Image (tube, rainbow, N blue to C red):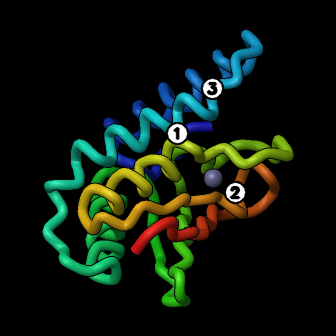
Amino acid sequence: MIDSSLPDGHRFLRYIFQALRFGFESHGVDYEPAIKKIGKDIGASISSNFKSESLEELLDEITVFWSKNGLGNVKIDDTNPPVIIVDNCFECHSMPNMDKKLCSFSAGLLEGIIAGNTGIECIIEETKCCGNGYDHCTYKMVKQTS
Ligand SMILES: [Zn+2]
């Protein structure tokens, strides 16, 4: 179901994104690796728009970017490494429990923005998702270099 609390443009884009997901699944296409790579490429290409010089500041900027663009409401758990929590995620909010995590595009987008802005190569792994029965998404960050 489309979230009627969002501005029209955001609602429509969510609908299209989720329709593409169901379309690929209905044709038996394993789209997760490709969509994560596409997310990372897009993240790298937009990373120059983020001005922060530290990971902590960048995560604050990401919080604002996600909200402004209808991608979700981000909270950062300041552990080391940080945990990224997303409510109202554009990829999975209102999706039924499909017993799988769904937000590989977002994970790739985060990886690309972080690597492009800070030089930190990391794996962003979604650990909780609306797609596996939670009411939010949680991502953990595994640094590859610092
Ligand atoms: Zn999710």
**Which amino acid type corresponds to the residue marked 1 in the rendered image?**
Lys
**Which amino acid type corresponds to the residue marked 2 in the rendered image?**
Cys
Instruction: Indicate the secondary structure of the residue bearing disc 3.
Output: loop
Q: Which mark is residue 31?
A: 3
Label 3: how many residues lie within 10 Å, few (<14), some (14-19) or many (20+)? few
Which residue is at a point 41% across and 33% down the rendered structure image? 13
**Which amino acid type corresponds to the residue marked 3 in the rendered image?**
Tyr
Q: CA distance from mark 1 to mark 3?
A: 9 Å
Q: Residue furthest top?
A: 27
Q: Position of residue 131 (x, y in %)?
A: 74, 48
Quick one: label 1 or label 3, which is nearer the N terminus? 3
Which residue is at a point 35% across and 74% down the rendered structure image? 59
Q: Position of residue 128 (x, y in %)?
A: 71, 62
Query: What quarter of the picture does the N terminus occupy?
Result: top right
Comparing 76 with 15, the one in front is 76
Q: Which mark is residue 129?
A: 2
Q: CA distance from mark 2 to mark 1?
A: 15 Å
Q: Nearer the viewer, mark 2 or mark 1?
A: 1
- Asked whether mark 2 lies closer than 8 Å to ligand 1, one says yes
Q: Where does label 1 land, which residue?
A: 36
Which residue is at a point 53% across and 54% down the rendered structure image? 89
Label 2: how many residues lie within 10 Å, few (<14), some (14-19) or many (20+)? many
Label 1: how many residues lie within 10 Å, few (<14), some (14-19) or many (20+)? many
User: Is residue 94 toward the left or the right of residue 79 in the image?
Assistant: right
Instruction: Indicate the secondary structure of the residue bearing disc 2.
Output: loop
Q: Which mark is residue 76?
A: none
130 is higher (above) or lower (below) than 98? below
Q: Position of residue 43 (x, y in %)?
A: 33, 47
Contact check, label 3 and label 2, Cβ < 8 Å: no
Comparing 19 with 109, the one in front is 109
